[in-house]
């Protein structure tokens, strides 16, 4: 299948200079902790950019292992979850990729160039939420052999849908030994979700992808990790990544912050989750009251479906008020009326709702 680059490589965070409020980038709305920003300055003052980082990232891996309570030998550090997806698909050389859509466009993006068959299973919609149907999954993989890869994000982008641990375990059990990759890029910011990191002990075919760029509101620093107990996968990916995939500034910052500010970061994550939950509820209620279809979400964003206005018209109106949102109309199975809105802090959220009301967007 030919995958149009413009369709799959199309992300939030790109807008013109007159935009003052960005609702298109799905990250922690609180912004990075001050002590993390101080460490970035410190790294620049030390001119660490003049050094190659340690390509084994021993200290950094230990910091991650301590912070997330994981075995450092089972961690591969990555340049954001996006690099993890890239590495998995390029290094594991699968013939079939099974995804649930609509989802993060990068999954689809590489399939064409790598000659991978994409099997797209639609999320099902019921009332105000999306869900994965286990029976559709089983039907779709009937004729796939164990060389395939199952990949999904949890919570999912852009629907905000969440699959609980029991269903993840069922999917893995039904996967006929295919490798199952769970992209948990948003899970740190979810109050009601639980990670499947602990399931790697049980399932040798499970790989978990994590991102810290959204958690700490630093998408420009590019950092995340892959976690699995599968030695073959670990070795392949570790060899396949470029040796210095985490730059020396990011490496310095996270080696220090995860160790020295562990307690502060736990508190930061915990209060971030609570604020996101409250603000997402505020936006959910406000959009529903305006007569716009809004989906239940476990992620720091909401998917909206308008009834009268197309996404492109909504974006034009909002842009004129200095606001940018994510066009969701090009995702498979969505419509020209869908957009995605990130959760921000109250003042911005109120402004967005006010612009919707005053402009009569429906
Ligand atoms: C599901 C999903 N995975 C991965 C990423 C990329 O995350 P990172 O910044 O860690 O590369 C995104 C970005 O929005 C995403 O939505």
Image (cartoon, rainbow, N blue to C red):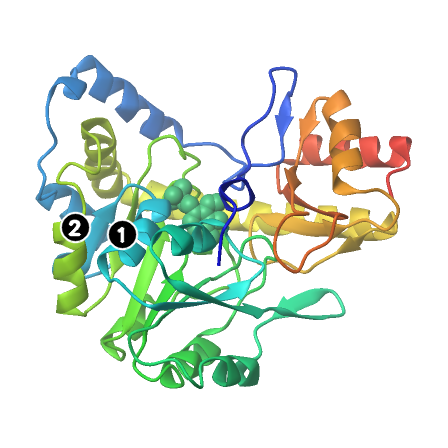
Side of 317 where 201 appears, left or right: left
> Can you give x and y, in whole percent of width and height, for residue 232 in the image?
14, 67
Classify residue 92 by image quadrant. bottom left
Side of 124 where 70 appears, left or right: left
Label 2 element class: helix
- The quadrant of the picture occupied by the C terminus is top right
| Location of residue 182 with respect to 328 vertically, above or below | below
> Can you give x and y, in whole percent of width and height, for residue 94 in the image?
30, 66
Q: Do the residues labelled 2 and 1 touch (CB within 8 Å)?
A: yes
**Which is more toward the observer, 351 or 318?**
318
The structure residue drawn at horizontal position 41% and vertical position 58%, both measured from the top left corner, is 184
The answer to whether any part of residue 263 appears in the image is yes
**Which is more toward the observer, 28 or 242?**
242
| Location of residue 247 with respect to 188 vertically, above or below | above
Q: How far apart are marks 2 and 1 (CA)?
A: 7 Å
> Can you give x and y, in whole percent of width and height, for residue 74 in the image?
17, 61
The structure residue drawn at horizontal position 66% and vertical position 41%, both measured from the top left corner, is 327
Label 1 element class: helix
| Location of residue 129 with respect to 314 vertically, above or below | below
> Can you give x and y, in whole percent of width and height, for residue 233 in the image?
19, 64
Q: Residues within 10 Å of mark 2 (few under 14, many from 20)?
A: some
The structure residue drawn at horizontal position 69% and vertical position 27%, both measured from the top left corner, is 323
Side of 55 where 84 appears, left or right: right
**Residue of label 1:** 87
**Residue of label 2:** 240
Which badge, 2 or 1, comes first in the chain's sequence?
A: 1
């Amino acid at each position: 299948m030919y995958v149009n680059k413009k369709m799959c490589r199309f992300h939030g965070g790109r807008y013109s200079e007159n935009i003052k409020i960005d609702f298109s980038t799905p990250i922690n709305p609180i912004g990075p902790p001050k002590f993390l920003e101080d460490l970035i300055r410190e790294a620049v003052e030390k001119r660490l950019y003049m050094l190659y980082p340690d390509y084994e990232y021993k200290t950094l891996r230990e910091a991650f292992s301590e912070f997330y309570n994981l075995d450092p030998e089972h961690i591969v550090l990555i340049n954001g979850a996006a690099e993890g997806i890239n590495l998995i698909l390029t290094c594991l050389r699968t013939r079939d990729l099974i995804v649930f859509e609509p989802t993060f466009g990068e999954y689809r993006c590489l399939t064409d160039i790598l000659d991978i068959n994409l099997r797209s299973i639609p999320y099902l919609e019921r009332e105000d939420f999306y869900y994965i149907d286990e029976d559709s999954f089983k039907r779709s993989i009937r004729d796939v052999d164990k060389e395939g890869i199952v990949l999904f994000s949890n919570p999912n982008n852009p629907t905000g849908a969440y699959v609980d641990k029991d269903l993840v375990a069922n999917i893995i059990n039904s996967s006929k030994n295919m490798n199952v990759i769970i992209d948990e890029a948003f899970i740190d910011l979810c109050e009601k979700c639980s990670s499947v990191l602990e399931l790697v002990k049980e399932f040798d075919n499970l790989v978990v992808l994590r991102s810290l760029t959204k958690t700490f509101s630093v998408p420009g620093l590019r950092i995340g990790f892959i976690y699995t107990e599968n030695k073959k996968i670990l070795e392949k990916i570790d060899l396949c990544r470029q040796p210095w995939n985490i730059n020396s500034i990011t490496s310095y910052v996270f080696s220090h912050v995860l160790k020295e500010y562990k307690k502060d970061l736990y508190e930061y994550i915990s209060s971030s989750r609570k604020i996101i939950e409250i603000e997402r509820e505020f936006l959910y209620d406000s959009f529903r009251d305006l007569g716009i279809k809004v989906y239940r979400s476990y992620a720091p964003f909401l998917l909206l479906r308008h009834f009268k206005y197309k996404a492109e018209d909504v974006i034009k109106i909002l842009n004129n008020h200095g606001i940018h949102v994510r066009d969701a109309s090009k995702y498979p199975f969505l419509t020209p009326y869908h957009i995605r809105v990130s959760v921000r802090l109250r003042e911005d959220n109120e402004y967005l709702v006010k612009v919707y009301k005053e402009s009569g967007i429906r």
